[in-house]
Image (cartoon, helix red, strand yellow):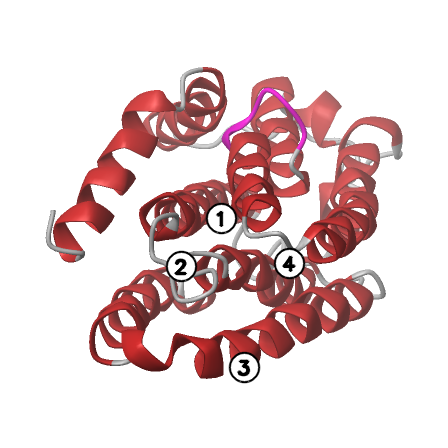
Amino acid sequence: MTTLLIASGPKLATFAVAFRILAGSLIGVASDWQQMLLVLSVLSMVLGNLVAIAQTNLKRMLAYSAIAQIGFVLLGMLSGIVGGSTNGAADAWSASMFYLVAYVLTTLGTFGVMMLMSRDGHEADDIADLKGLGRRNPALAFVMLILMFSLAGIPPTIGFYAKLSVLKAVIDAGMVWLAVLAVLMSLVGAFYYLRIVKTVYFDEPVDTQALRPLPSAQALIAVNGALVLLLGLVPGPLMSLCADAVKQAFGG
């Protein structure tokens, strides 16, 4: 639970604080903080993905991949102001907000699956613990597949649309090279996310006993997975909410 809170809640709070500071008090020196965000974004995506790919512990993998995911959020934040113009700021910052909401929603589901798989005296925090989940609990395995597809940015999940909206903001800002780098880093990330899917469906289970969590808990995880899929198919309402929030913060 502690890891779950660290992986989700503070990121939303950090975005809100950063938005207020950068888009408010420091809007006049945007060219300075944009360069800092550019360096942080590139380092986050490169280092986060390269370290995550070497992990065998699922929690550590998700922790390092979170660094890479935040790199994507920073891409939208630094793309909003071009040559002193804030015309594209609302779209770029709302793309970052949408991306962060998508990430938090997906991470909640992922840690939820891990908690349902845990049992007395053993936490399911290693990738090996997911072996054969497709046979032990097909419904839970399918939710895990959707969540990993979303983190990897594979359609039709919310993660795909989130990455697409941020990349559009970066390209609109004229930083095509940065968009290309982000796509390459996404491919690296897709490797270790899809490795989880392979473990779930194709590896022999260590524990062959059927996994039967509480029906209410499994239903909650199913709703989470359904939202990740539904918001990827129909992202418009959530994106509109993010855009409205950003525009109000900018003063309409």
From the image, tell me which residue sits under label 2.
Answer: 8
From the image, tell me which residue sits under label 1.
Answer: 107
Q: In the figure, is residue 151 to the left or right of 93? A: right
From the image, tell me which residue sits under label 4.
Answer: 125
Front label number (1 vs 3): 3
Q: What element carries label 1?
A: helix
Q: Is mark 3 on a helix, strand or loop?
A: helix
Q: Is mark 2 on a helix, strand or loop?
A: helix
From the image, tell me which residue sits under label 3.
Answer: 36
* Above or below, comparing residue 33 to residue 248 in the picture: below
* Above or below, comparing residue 3 to residue 237 in the picture: below
Question: Disc 1 marks which amino acid?
Answer: Thr
Which region is colored magenta? 154-158
Coordinates of residue 48 in the picture (x, y in percent):
70, 68
Q: Earlier in the sequence, mark 1 or mark 4?
A: 1
Q: What element carries label 4?
A: loop
